[in-house]
Image (spheres, rainbow, N blue to C red):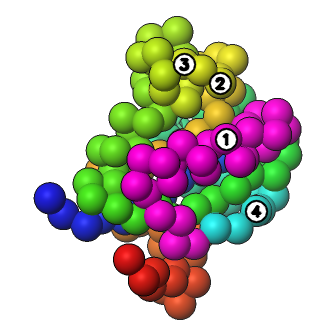
Amino acid sequence: MALERTFSIIKPDGVQKNLIGEVIRRFESAGLKIVAARMVQLTQAQAEGFYAVHRERPFFKDLVKYMISGPVVVQVLEGENAVAKNRELMGATDPKKADKGTIRADLASSIEENVVHGSDSAENARNEIAYFFATSDVLARTR
Ligand code: CMP
């Protein structure tokens, strides 16, 4: 198994509903370590840039509006197979389709307000981490 890093966002609904602790508890309980974290209010340009792959999708405008509606917590998670593990913990994008016991099934209210974002590949993880963090922001952790 490979030690990997992935990128995670606790979205505005997660922060608003005081779920920061609960989400991080789930990451840490599953063996993912937080190696960088920051609370940010995204600008429109930052949100549009981050979700640029979805620019042509019908939900893009609403997605950007929602992502700038309040602060988010951006994080780098590290662990064995961190990309896949984080996606397992999150569950499917649509909470109605997510497996029971996942973050989205248990805590999310809709396909848009789905509490968390997580990178879907190691390559996207590298790009998404670099979008928010300088190399020097990501700390080496004693394991
Ligand atoms: P995320 O995993 O961050 O990637 C894109 C986001 O767009 C998704 O989570 C949802 O918050 C949002 N979204 C809204 N509607 C849809 C949809 N129909 N399909 C996929 N994502 C959607």
Q: Residue 107, image x and y in percent? A: 65, 24
Q: Nearer the viewer, mark 1 or mark 2?
A: 1
Pointer 1 residue: 22
Residue visible at 39% across and 39% down in the picture: 87
Q: Taking 73 as reference, is 142 above or below it? A: below
Say what amino acid the circle numbered 1 marks: Glu
Q: Quadrant of ligand 1?
A: top right
Say what amino acid the circle numbered 2 marks: Leu
Circles 2 and 3: CB distance less than 8 Å? yes
Residue visible at 51% across and 54% down in the picture: 28
Q: Answer with the quarter of the image where residue 38 lies.
A: bottom right
Circles 4 and 2: CB distance less than 8 Å? no
Say what amino acid the circle numbered 4 marks: Met
Q: Is residue 115 left or right of residue 40?
A: left
Residue 29 visible in the picture: yes
- Mark 3 and mark 1: Cα distance apart in space: 14 Å
Q: Is residue 35 magenta?
A: yes
Q: Taking 79 as reference, is 133 above or below it? A: below
- Mark 4 and mark 1: Cα distance apart in space: 16 Å
User: Quick one: quadrant of the C terminus?
Assistant: bottom left
Mark 3 CB lies closer than 8 A to ligand 1:
no
Residue visible at 42% across and 17% down in the picture: 99
- SS at mark 4? strand
Pointer 2 residue: 107
Outermost residue on the top side: it is 96
- Callout 2: 10 Å neighbours few (<14), some, many (20+)? many
Pointer 4 residue: 39
Mark 4 or mark 1: name the one nearer the start of the chain.
Answer: 1
Q: Which mark is residue 105?
A: 3
Outermost residue on the bottom side: it is 136
Mark 3 or mark 4: name the one nearer the start of the chain.
Answer: 4
